[in-house]
Amino acid sequence: MASNTLNLIAILSLTISILLSLYPQPAFSFQMEDFDSEEEYVLDHPVIIPNLRSRSRFLKTSPTKDKIRKGADCDPHPSLNICKGISANNGTSLLYCCKTHCRNVLSDRNNCGKCGNRCEFGQRCCGGVCTNVANNVNHCGKCGNQCSSGVQCDNGFCGYA
């Protein structure tokens, strides 16, 4: 009896693995973090880092920063914040301090368009707007993937007219 059960389990797992290998991969993923591929943001204009700890009269200038690490810590207080709506990566990113981390509100699914605005399941944040990428001809399967004229977007794939 136990031998028959083990054989059945082995056959079922082999069948499932074969079926999964034949099934096509989806055109879009459902990761819960933002979708930026860069590990750091290159700022379009360097920012001055506020330094309130130094009381030296010899330090007339504050250091500047031209890159910010993805997900860097920030302080939501306006005078201490390094991510207060600054443009990065040639205008393709817009950084805000959401809770205590720098987030790109143009592509972050959990902070789409503004801090705390979460996109629904199956949506991506495309240019700060939650977008259904399964059936959108301008964002088919991913942001910016535009189908040819007259071609429909079906389940994240550009089909035929």
Image (tube, grey):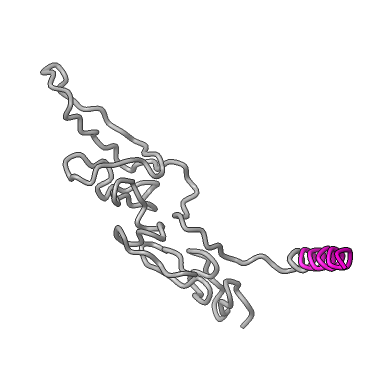
Residue in the image at 46% along x and 69% along y: 123
Asked whether 74 or 160 is in front, the reply is 74
Q: Looking at the picture, how far across and down is residue 8, in whole percent?
A: 84, 68
Q: Looking at the picture, how far across and down is residue 54, in whole percent?
A: 17, 23
Q: Is residue 150 shown left or right of residue 24?
A: left
Q: Quadrant of the N terminus?
A: bottom right
Asked whether 112 or 48 is in front, the reply is 112
Answer whether residue 11 is magenta in the image.
yes
Q: Is residue 106 shown left or right of residue 137?
A: left
Is 86 situated above or below 115? Answer: above
Specify the segment rendered in magenta. Answer: 1-18
Q: Looking at the picture, how far across and down is residue 21, in whole percent?
A: 76, 63
Asked whether 106 or 147 is in front, the reply is 106
Residue 111 occupies which quadrant of the picture? bottom left
Residue in the image at 58% along x and 79% along y: 151
Residue in the image at 64% along x and 80% along y: 160
Q: Is residue 16 shown left or right of residue 39?
A: right
Per the picture, the main secondary structure of the magenta-coloured stretch is helix
Answer whether residue 3 is magenta in the image.
yes
Residue 69 occupies which quadrant of the picture? top left
Q: Quadrant of the C terminus?
A: bottom right
